[in-house]
Amino acid sequence: MRLYVYVLQAKDLLARDSFVKLQLGMYKSKTRILRNNSNPVWNEEFVFRVHDIHDEEVVLSMFHHDDDSGLFHFSGELMGRVRVPVWSVAGEENQMLPPTWFSLEKPKTGKFNDKDCGKLLLSMCLGGKGHDASSNSLLSPHSNVNAEDLIEFEGPCVLSHDVFSSKAPTLHIAEGKHLMKAIVSRLEKVFHKNEEASKNGDSSELSSVPSDYEDSVEEHPSCHSFEEAMKMMQSRDSTKEMPENLQGGILLDQVYLVSPSDLNKLLFAPDSQFMRDLAELQGTTDIQEGPWVWKSGDMSCLTRTVSYMNAATKLVKAVKATEQETYIRANGREFAILMNVSTPDVPYGNTFNIELLYKLMPGPELPSGEDSCRLIISWGINFHQTTMMRSMIEGGVRKGMKENFDQFANLLAKTHKISDSTDILDKDHVLATLETEHQSDWELAVEYFWNFTVVSGTFFVLYVLVHILLCEPNKVQGLEFYGLELPDSFGELITCGFLVIQLERVYSMISHFVQARLQRGSDHGVKAQGEGWVLTVALIEGVNLASLELTGLPDPYVVFTCNGKTRTSSVKLQTCDPQWNDILEFDAMEEPPSVLDVEVFDFDGPFDQATSLGHAEINFLKHTSTDLADMWVSLEGKLAQSSQSKLRLRTFLDNKKGVETVKEYLTKMEKEVGKKLNLRSPYKNSTFQKLFALPPEEFLISDFTCHLKRKMPLQGRLFLSARIVGFYANLFGHKTKFFFLWEDIHDIQVLPPSLSSVGSPSLVIILRKDRGLDARHGAKSQDEEGRLRFYFQSFVSFNEASRTIMALWRTRTPTPDQKAQIAEERQDGELSMLEDAGSLLDVEDAKMSRVCFAELPMNIKALMEMFDGGMLEHKVMEKSGCLNYTNTSWEPLNSGVSERHVSYRFSRHVSIFGGEVTCRQRKSPLANDEGWIVNEIMSLHDVPFDDHFRVHFKYEIQKSALAHNACKCAVYIGITWLKSTKFQQRITRNITEKFSNRLKEMIGLVEREILFATRQDTSSI
């Protein structure tokens, strides 16, 4: 939860140059210094994150700034302090403390300790996600402000706040006056006490600004220029997100060589020359352009109304149109303007209105270094009433929009040059630039070590060395002897201690710097192998990454997953704003990838349960190549969202063989489907891509006519491509359109013919939990686990359709047998590498430590069932978090020694990485058949540094001396390092702790399962 603190103004201060410091816990911030004013007006906003409402408080300290205060008086003289507990704000109605005067608490010392220090006007609000609700509530007509809200606290009031983020941008002074006028006006209108307000002491304080502001707070004309209005909008637009494109489609998506703010001014400033030229080109007349005005309510925004007469066409006469233009985002870099266009005079004009959304965003970085702006214009149509002419209306609107915005684009291209797409998508140039952007080690060293700690430490060491050279040797005294000299006074002892502490801090900084420079992820710079679809991800930087510790900084790195393959970035040490510039390439794939999973971790070991700093999913079907070429990805997760963490990525998806890759893919699918699959024409592919707004690399494989079963069957067409299953229907202008990914499918079932399906078999597609939510309007039902179920029936050829769908699904989601085969192939490669390095199964016991020991009330044969591949082993492994568990049978090697292979995947409850595991187990009997020894080598995959180490387990199972029908089991663990890394101790500790608990849990499960089975057998007898 966030606390918004508004420092409005102060009065009756004892000094004229003042500022306010705010503190919540360990975080601090402050206002600007206002000079020559004993009644300063700040109107500044601060945002803090609150962890505990009941215990935290915000402290506001008023200081007098003195330019002559000296070197060590940075804060000036304290004039007074105000404390406010967070729980007091939470107890207010709507969790908002209205503007309130607080008397400053006198300081205990200083020249202001015996005088009345003045008063401070504050407002506070507790909010969740949005800043707007709190900041705008001061102006909202629905704010519940009563006569007691404007209180004057004479005594000290306890207040507390913890700063979460840095100070928000300072409001413009003009806006501050605007805000104060709005508060006064609102209070006067709510209480109808305009005359009494001038007499009231508290109100007079608020009325100290000019009182000629009488307009309504709901909507008032902007008295500032367009540039000032943009600055005011920017100060209120700190957390709003860029809206999604409208459903009608995109009319224009282009990058221009101009900054977003300049293009925004060109298009929407009053009396824009460009808009006048466009009106002349399109024959628009009688243009009446209203002023930009502030509109307050649920969301404060800038809006205006424009009316004009559209030119007549062959079918429609000249009609009047009215546009309501509203800024819904304007932060200085990004702008979003929503237009609501109504044309009541056209046929059926009262049944609908048109929406246009202009989005202006910074374009990709260009080699020339010029500013660029990406302009996206989308449209939609809203019907207020049902009409049979809906399809015709949509078609006419679409045609008219296309003609108008073609003229718009041509005219804009004459004003500002269009960026060449080859510059934006030049992969080789971008990657080469990243390689050259690395600073030299000397430059980084100067930047890193140029700080007070290193400079003072170096100076102190040099000072001591010079002192030693200038001094004569002291005589031996006290407990000293030749070769040992001790401090002769407490001052010397303190000096030595200070010197040791400084040197230790400098050494720690040097160690961190060297580690950061030498550490590289194993996948950085590794080139892709093979031919086909090659995915290249350039990880540029991250901002505002969360830290798991309040006082420490994270060691972040990023794991990318695509089509079951992972790539890992380098680890950056002790930073929340890492700079990577890592280039990661995925090996060539036969089909284009659908999604890229991104997850940021704070490295502490492969089995740490709380290392994720945030995650995101990039859907390649929802982004164009221009989007992917340079994008900021917002991370999800509690930590990431609270910190507003983001990653900057540059992603390139290349098809090295062009059409040949598609042909090879279709040839492969022909064997699975059992019929000829022809390459569709470019026109049909283009129509398919436009229908579902898909990127140009998507290609259609097959399509079928069928019914979608919901409450009533809906006839349409089912489209199958390499990455999606899509459905489209148009029934009397009512369109139904959706698609979902093959990877989203959990299961496909075939239902036999029934009366409800009109004698036709049905194909039921069940999606995974929380997947395909964009297509939920096409699902018939949702089961208790949250999975969507889609029913398709009445295919012309059901067998052909079901066979094609099942074959395409299997290729995108391997079966357990295929997974076992892949794991076995991977294991063979791992084992060959291990055999070349020497057998790890002969690791000395001295390198292993015992982590588990148990005396069990069962014989050795019963306990060895956990290694025989039967029901007990599978049940125990599944309960302990092993997914897709498979094992081979024991194969004899020599006298009494057998070997087998095991593979499975850890669940997310065991390892946040969910990595694949391959094991080689070898068992041999003890002397005199007193028990068994089982050695196991475990290889972890898809976890950080998985190629650096192997885990070795040793199970000793032998008879127990406590009872005849009992045995004892001891388990040892050791780690063999194939490559060295600075994280060796951390990984060893993490794995040892994790597997110690896991092995104890597994032995407990085995004991319970065997005893339970024994009791059942006894009771049945």
Image (spheres, rainbow, N blue to C red):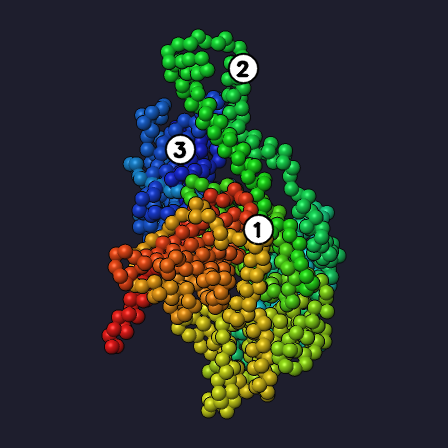
Which residue appears at 42% of the width and 35% of the height?
A: 21
- Answer with mark 3 or mark 2, whichever residue precedes in sequence: 3
Q: Which mark is residue 466?
A: 2
Where is residue 622 drawn, in percent x and y?
Answer: 59, 64
| Tags 1 and 3 touching, CB below 8 Å | no
For the C terminus, which image quadrant? bottom left
Check the image and report above or below for 341 versus 295: below
Which residue appears at 47% of the width and 21% of the height?
A: 70
**Residue at numbered disc 3:** 62
The amino acid type of the residue labelled 3 equals Met
Q: Quick check: can you spot residue 602? A: no
In the rendered view, does 428 fall on the left or right side of 55?
A: right
- Answer with mark 2 or mark 1, whichever residue precedes in sequence: 2
The amino acid type of the residue labelled 2 equals Val
Give the class, few, some or many, for how many residues have Cα within 10 Å of label 2's Cα (few <14, many ≥20): few
SS label for mark 3: strand
Where is residue 932 drawn, in percent x and y?
Answer: 39, 59
Where is residue 484 drawn, in percent x and y?
Answer: 44, 16
In the rendered view, does 123 fall on the left or right side of 398?
A: left
**Residue at numbered disc 1:** 837
Which residue appears at 34% of the width and 47% of the height?
A: 52
The amino acid type of the residue labelled 1 equals Ala
